Image: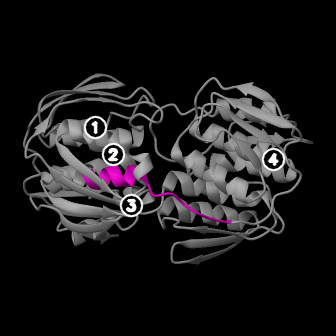
């Protein structure tokens, strides 16, 4: 158990480096199971979720070597195809093992994946896509049981433009017999990152970054080396942290191609993001203006940045509409912001009106998940007095040493571990 104690009122200045993308690293690590040869992945963020995922791979039979932010994995032989219940319960991304295990050995057993509680998060689209390739599933009260004698390419239409379902089907299809067409496929940058790794491994994939992905199955994949993209969610989070404190700083190692919607919205509100190569300079206009924060599938604003933008909206003049249709419990964290002094009216599980600017006061609050917890950190940076965030270890599932990196910019965050 970890908690953060934050002293508010300090402007952030200086330089900070963004890490590799959590949402890209996890499927890329899963893809290493598709070959018995060695794979090397660079720029892997050393966050809690990655550590749990690597423990799962070790339990399945992988030999894993970690050196700084480079992970080398080789799974010559799978010793089991059952994902450990205790590890699957910690991590929703464990669902990404369905496709690789079915493709590699034709069987998988897994309990329902855990992770952040954001409301109903069904996995039916995963099963629909894998069943279209010839897999068969059964389930009981705790686990799913999948089998596939031979995966066969198929043209499929997905009920949901699901990121993880697209990734799962993509990883299964690369070793299926024949051609697979996935429509409408998700287009997020981390899917492109995964697809490029698969191509390096010998897969034949077309249409990455579009809503129609075509995969021509091959009989075998080989080892490969690839790097994880810069994390656009972390980039946006750091930019908001700098801006909301009226600081001035530079974020290094960004991916300039993945920030259009984020920079557009920050500009609307009053944070000035200036891209120069792989650097993002962040400053402010001085005052913030209310805006419509509409969450949607890529390339629009990502849901993982919504809580951070909501905190920024509490400091903006006027009334901002927050609309996040993806998860029915995503906005419940706003009660804690209200207790700090924010003026937020929850209209329904998916919409909130934020009126500002309102001063925030430090208090003790509990982090419910990665992104809401990070939003509380931002609130603590500008609140008067001290803010204590309990269960801050949840934040560290998605952000590596975030307390240290913010402190290097001038924040005052004390990390206390029980």
| Residue at (45% x, 29% y) in the render | 326
Whichever of labels 3 and 1 marks the residue nearer the N terminus, that label is 1
The residue under label 2 is: 372
Whichever of labels 4 and 2 marks the residue nearer the N terminus, that label is 4
Q: Is residue 192 left or right of residue 399?
A: right
* Viewer-side label of 2, 3: 2
Q: Residue furthest front?
A: 277
When asked about the image quadrant of residue 118, the answer is top left
Mark drawn on residue 265: 1
User: Which x, y percent locates residue 169?
Assistant: 71, 40
Q: Residues within 10 Å of mark 2 (few under 14, many from 20)?
A: many
- Front in this rendered view, residue 289 or 92: 289
**Residue 200 counted in the magenta span:** no
The residue under label 4 is: 102
* Labels 3 & 1 near each other (Cβ < 8 A): no
Q: Residues within 10 Å of mark 3 (few under 14, many from 20)?
A: many
Over which residues does the magenta segment extend? Answer: 225-239
Distance from disc 2 to disc 3, alpha carbons, whole Å, reads 12 Å
The residue under label 3 is: 393
């Amino acid at each position: 158990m970890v908690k953060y104690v934050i002293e508010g009122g300090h402007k952030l200045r200086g330089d900070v480096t963004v890490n590799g993308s959590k949402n890209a690293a996890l499927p890329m690590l899963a893809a290493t199971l598709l070959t018995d040869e060695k794979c090397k992945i660079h720029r892997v963020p050393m966050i809690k979720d990655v550590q749990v995922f690597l423990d799962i791979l070790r339990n399945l039979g992988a030999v894993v070597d970690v050196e700084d932010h480079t992970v080398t994995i080789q799974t010559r032989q799978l010793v089991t195809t059952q994902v450990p219940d205790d590890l699957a319960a910690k991590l929703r991304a464990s669902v990404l093992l369905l496709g690789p295990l079915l493709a590699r050995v034709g069987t998988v057993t897994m309990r329902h994946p855990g992770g952040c509680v954001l409301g109903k998060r069904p996995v039916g689209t995963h099963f629909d896509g894998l069943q279209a390739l010839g897999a068969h599933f059964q389930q009981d009260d705790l686990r799913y049981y999948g089998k596939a004698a031979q995966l066969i390419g198929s043209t499929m239409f997905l009920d949901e433009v699901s990121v993880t379902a697209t990734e799962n089907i993509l990883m299964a299809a690369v070793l299926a017999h024949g051609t697979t067409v996935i429509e409408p496929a998700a287009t997020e940058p981390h899917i492109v990152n995964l697809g490029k790794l698969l191509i390096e491994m010998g897969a034949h994939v077309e249409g990455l970054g579009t809503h129609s992905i075509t995969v021509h199955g091959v009989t075998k994949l080989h080892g490969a080396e690839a790097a994880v993209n810069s994390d656009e969610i972390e980039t946006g989070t750091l930019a908001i942290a700098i801006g909301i404190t009226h600081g001035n700083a530079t974020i290094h190692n960004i991916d300039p191609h993945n920030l259009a919607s984020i920079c557009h919205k920050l500009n609307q509100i009053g944070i000035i993001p200036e891209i120069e190569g792989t650097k993002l300079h962040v400053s402010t206009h001085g005052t913030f203006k209310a805006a419509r924060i509409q969450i949607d599938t890529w390339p629009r604003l990502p849901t993982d940045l919504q809580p951070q933008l909501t905190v920024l909206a509490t400091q903006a003049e006027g009334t901002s509409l927050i609309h996040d249709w993806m998860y029915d419990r995503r906005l419940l964290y706003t009660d804690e912001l209200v207790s700090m002094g924010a003026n937020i009216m929850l209209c329904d599980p998916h919409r909130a009106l934020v009126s500002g600017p309102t001063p925030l006061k430090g208090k003790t609050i509990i982090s419910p998940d990665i992104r809401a917890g990070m939003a509380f950190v931002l609130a603590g940076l500008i609140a008067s007095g001290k803010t204590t965030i309990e269960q801050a270890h949840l934040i560290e599932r998605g952000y590596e040493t975030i307390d240290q990196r913010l402190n290097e910019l001038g924040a005052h965050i004390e990390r206390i571990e029980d």
